[in-house]
Amino acid sequence: FNLTAMAAIGGFLFGYDTGVISGAMLPLHRTFNLTAWQEEVVVSSTVLSAFVASLCGGSLNRAFGRRISILFAAAVFTFGSLVLAVAWGYLSLVAGRIVVGIGIGVASLTTPIYLAEVAAPEMRGRLVTINALLVTMGQFIAGMVDGIFDEYFPDEGWRYMLGLAAVPSMIMFFGFMFLPESPRWLAMNGFTKEALHALNTMRDSDEVAYSEFEEILDDLPSNDSDENEENEQGHANEDYGSIQKSKLCGEPSEHHFLSQVSAMLSDAPTRRALCLGCGLMALQQLSGINTVMYYAASIYEMSEFDEMTSVWLSGFTALAQVIGVAFSIYFVERLGRRQLVLTSLAFVTLCLLGLGASFYLARTHSGPITKTLGKCGNQKALVWSGVTTFTYDCAHYDGCGFCGTICTEGNMTGPTDPDVCAPTDEWLYDAAPNPFGWYSVFFMVAYLLAFGIGMGGMPWTINSEIYPLRYRSVAVSFSTATNWIGNLIVSATFLSISSPGALTAYGAFWLYGIIALSGFCWLFVSLPETKGLSLEEIGRLFRRSDDEYTEVDSVEESNLIAKASKAPTLMPMH
C-alpha cells in the first residue's frame, strides 16, 4: 500500500497541474493582460519541457533507477511550484511552468514503470490504473481549489492555486526516501541479492518471490546476463547505495542512449510494441482530452457562461473522469484492457461529435443580425462564409458587439457610436444568448466519463506492460514523449483552430471526433489483450515466426497469443 500510495502521488501531481491551469488562466489573463498567444505559451511551455524531460528521463531511469528518478522529479516540481507562487510577470510565469514541466515529464514516465515492475501480475493493471485515477483526482481537486480561490481571492488567488502543488510533491519526495528500488531494475543492473530482497518484501511468500525472480533473470538476454554476472562480481564488496552515489558523482553510464535506441529499434518485437504504445499515447492526446482539461473554463465561456460559473463548472466536470477511471479500475482485470479501450473510444467519438454539434446549434440559434456597421460585417474564415449572420458571429468578432439585431464596433462599456442602439436594446459584448449551453455541459461530462473508462488510464497501463525489461526505460520514455508532444500540439493550437477564422469551436471538436474514430478502427485490429499475463509473457505476444529468438518455443508462444485473444487454448504443463 505504501509503495502504491507514494508512487501514485506522481499521477496526482500530473493531474493537479493539468487541472489547475484551466481555472487559473482566467485570473492570469486579467492580472498580466495576456494575449491568446501568451495564454497558449503559458499552457504549452509546461508540455514542451515535459516532452523533453520524458525523452531524457529514459536514460535517467536506466542509469540511476526508478527511485532516484522519482526523487529528482519531486524536487524539481516543488521548486517550480514555488516559483509560480511568487511569479511577478509573464516571463517568470513561463519559467516556473517550464521547471514544473521537467518534474512532470520525469514523474509521468517513471511512476507507471515503477508500479508495473513492483506489482504482482494479477494486480498490475489495477495498480497502474490507480495512478491514472490519481491523475483525474488531481484534476478534480485542482478544479475545486480554482473555484475557491477565484471566488474569495479574485486578484491573488492564482498564486495559491499554482503554489499548493508543492505540498504533495514534498510528500512524495520524503516518502520515496524510505521506499525500495524496483527489483527488475536491480536485477538488470546486477544487484541480484537486493532484487530478491525487494521481491521478498513485496510478495506474499518467499516461494512466490523466488519464482518471479527466476522469471526476471530468464527474461534477460544472454549478453545482459553475462554483464550481470560481471556486475555482481564487481559489486561484491560494494552495496547498492555506494554504487548509486558513485553514479551521481559523475561516472558515465555504460549504456549510451543512442546505442540503446539503435538496439531497441533493431529488435522487431520491441519495434512492434513501440508502434502500438506510441500510437496509443498519440491517440489519447489527439482525441482532445487536454483541450477539455486545460481550457475547460474557456470552453464554458465560449458557451456563454460567466467567468465564475465557468470556473466552477470546469472543476465539477473533472469529477466525471474520476468516476470513469474508478470504473476502469474495477473492470480492468475482469473485462481486460482491449475491451475498455475500444468501448471508451466509441463513446468518446460520439461525445465529441455531440459537443461540436452543441456549438453549431449555439451559433445557428443565437438570433439573427440584420445590420452590420464598420468592420463587423465580414471576417476571415476557413470553413464558413465569414459573413456576420448571427449574434454568435458578432460576439466572437474581436471589437464587435450587438444591440437588438445590429452588430457594430464597441467595447465592454458600449458601442463606439452610442446613437446606433435604441434605448430599449441591451448592449452585449463578447457574449450572445445560447439556449444550448447546457448541451455543451452534458457532452463535456459524458466525454470525460467515457474517456476515463478506457483512454484515461489504459494507454499508461499498456505501455508499462508491453516492453521487454532491457528496453523498458527507453521505450516508455519514447511513448511518454509521444504523449507529451501530442499534448503540446493540442494545447498550443486549440485556441487558434477553434477561432472563427480557422475551424471554429464546432469544427475543432469534430476534428477530434474523426481522429478518435480512426483510432478505434486501428486499435480494433492491432490491440492485443494483456490481462493476466506476466510482463515477460506479454513481451512474447509481439514476436513473429520469422523473428530471431530462442527463449520461447513455438508451442508456448501460440498458447500465449491464444490467451491474449481470449481463446480457450490451455497452456501445457512443463
Image (spheres, rainbow, N blue to C red):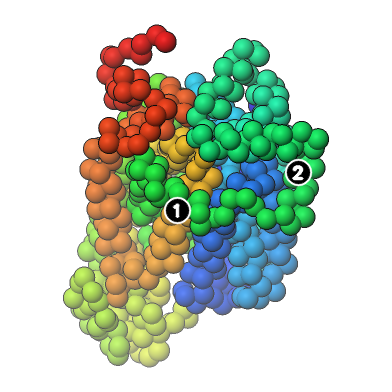
Asked if residue 363 is positioned above or below residue 116 in the image, the reply reads below
Which quadrant would residue 89 be assigned to in this image?
bottom right
Identity of the residue furthest to the left in this view = 385
**Residue plotted at (48% across, 69% down):** 40
From mark 2 to mark 1, how far is it between C-alphas?
27 Å
Residue 445, visible in the rendered structure: no
Helix, strand or loop at mark 2: helix
Helix, strand or loop at mark 1: helix
- Please tell me which of labels 2 and 1 falls first in the chain: 2
The N terminus lies in quadrant = top right
Look at mark 2 in the image and give the residue it sits on: 243
Q: Residues within 10 Å of mark 2 (few under 14, many from 20)?
A: some
Asked if residue 58 is positioned above or below residue 131 in the image, the reply reads below
Asked if residue 322 is positioned above or below residue 162 in the image, the reply reads above
Which quadrant would residue 42 be assigned to in this image?
bottom right
Q: Position of residue 28 (x, y in %)?
A: 59, 68
Please name the amino acid that badge 1 sits on: Ser
Q: Is 311 placed left or right of 432 in the picture?
A: right
Look at mark 1 in the image and give the residue it sits on: 262
**Residue plotted at (67% across, 47% down):** 64
Please count the marks in the image.
Answer: 2
Q: Position of residue 347 (x, y in %)?
A: 29, 40
**Residue plotted at (66% across, 37% down):** 230
Please name the amino acid that badge 2 sits on: Ile
Residue 99, visible in the rendered structure: yes
Q: Is 167 placed left or right of 324 in the picture?
A: right
Q: Position of residue 81 (x, y in %)?
A: 69, 59
In depth, the one of 403 and 357 nearer the eye is 357
Q: Position of residue 452 (x, y in %)?
A: 42, 39
